Amino acid sequence: MVKVFYKNHGQTWKADVDFRNQLTSKLEMNPQEVSSEMKSEFIIAFVPIVSRPRTDIEVALNKIPESCPVVLVVLHHTLDPYFDPPDSRRCVNRRNVFTVDCLFYEDRGLLKCHRNEEALRAVKDHLEASYQIPEMVWRMLIVGLTLGATRFRLPYAIFLVVVLFLLLAFLDNFFHVKWVNRVLVICFLLVIIFC
């Protein structure tokens, strides 16, 4: 279960609630809403455009810690479901920020339109792909442990090095683990396992 913190940066007129409900119904995994940014694996931030997109996005991102991956849902206020807003991804210069554009109107919430469906699908795919990597690594580790108990230790050690390297490479996106530290952690874990 992925831990998500939802954050509003302005008046969304319940477009955030609509987005959240539709996203939850589409996801195969059940997101768990947490009360703090520090407890979350993802921050889903809703940014309604009030003045200029670049300014509003920069203000919102400055209030979010850089250590956590962010799904930035940029909300464009319009009544036209065919409105083509500027691509907000060009306004983002930060790593670990996945940006989508949505259309909403104050008394209707999130509009029913192709752009919003595409944004929901993109966020769903992004969250599921990001969450499946550690789950796959843990499954590989369990298979390696069961094989390692009955077979020669060298293939097991090679398998563990690869799995640990992949796991630490994944964590690099979140914790910015340096290369040297990654190698040291792998060596340390191998010494513990084989001694």
Image (cartoon, helix red, strand yellow):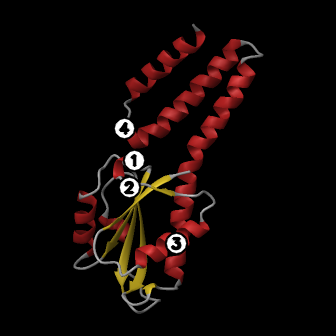
Residue 147 at x, y = what percent? 74, 23
Label pair 3/4, CB-CB below 8 angstroms: no
Nearest-to-viewer mark from 3 and 2: 2
Q: Are marks 4 and 2 in contact (CB under 8 Å)?
A: no
For residue 183, what is the image quadrant?
top left
Residue linked to disc 2: 35
In front: label 3 or label 4:
3
The picture places residue 11, in percent across and down from the top left corner, at: 30, 78
Label disc, if present, on residue 21 of the rendered structure: 3
**Mark 1 vs 3, N-terminal side:** 3
Q: Measuring from the top left, give residue 17's x and y in whole percent.
A: 44, 74
Dot 4 lies on which element? loop
How far, Cα to Cα, is label 3 from label 2?
A: 18 Å
Q: Marks 1 and 2: CB-CB under 8 Å?
A: yes
Residue 29 x %, y %: 60, 57
Dot label at residue 39: 1
- Proximity of marks 3 and 2: CB atoms separated by less than 8 Å: no
